[in-house]
Image (cartoon, rainbow, N blue to C red):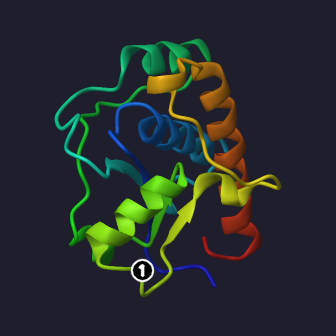
Amino acid sequence: MAMDRKLKIMFICLGNICRSPMAEFVMRDELSRRHLDHLIEVSSGATSYEEYGNPVYPPAVQKMKREGVTIYPHRATPIVKEDYDRYDMFIGMEDYNLRRMRNIFGGDKDNKISKLLDYTSRGGDIADPWYSGNFDATYRDVVEGVDGLINHLTENNLI
């Protein structure tokens, strides 16, 4: 059943400068394209303080610009325990993110934590382009995951 308020989703990765902002921005654009942006509030966060306050990593910005994705103002922000009660879903990029979220939140009693590629037919982790340098593969995975997530939300009447 659809909610009577906006569904609040936060995408999570280690530093919040590559994968999670890519997912946030792609999700915002896709929700707008599908005329669903009034139903979901989207943000992103980090499981570490390593990149606190930093902007999106320039190669990630360049990739999104080449793909026509809208770039929003962004500074890396670590998640805190209190975020668990502020959001409906936390979408991590890899297993490590999920473990760190559960540690920060003190568990996942309401089953709010999942991985982005869980919403695809293949599952798996989205490789960190900070280490791989492959922003094309990361972008493709993010787009596939976002599409699957939106389809999941609409098919299950969650929005």
In this picture, is 91 found above or below 155?
A: above
Residue shown at 41% from the left, 51% from the top: 12
Q: Would you say 21 lies left or right of 33 here?
A: left
Query: Which residue is identified by label 1?
Result: 108
**Who is closer to the viewer here, 52 or 102?**
102
Q: Would you say 135 lies left or right of 15 here?
A: right
Residue shown at 64% from the left, 48% from the top: 146
Total number of numbered discs in the rendering: 1
In this picture, is 15 found above or below 67?
A: below
Residue type at mark 1: give it. Asp
* Extreme residue toward the right, this view: 121
- Residue 149, given in percent of the width and then of the height, sits at 66, 57
- Residue 78, given in percent of the width and then of the height, sits at 23, 50
**Who is closer to the viewer here, 88 or 129?**
129
- Residue 120, given in percent of the width and then of the height, sits at 76, 54
In this picture, is 20 found above or below 71?
A: below
Q: Would you say 16 lies left or right of 97 here?
A: left
**Who is closer to the viewer here, 82 or 93?**
93
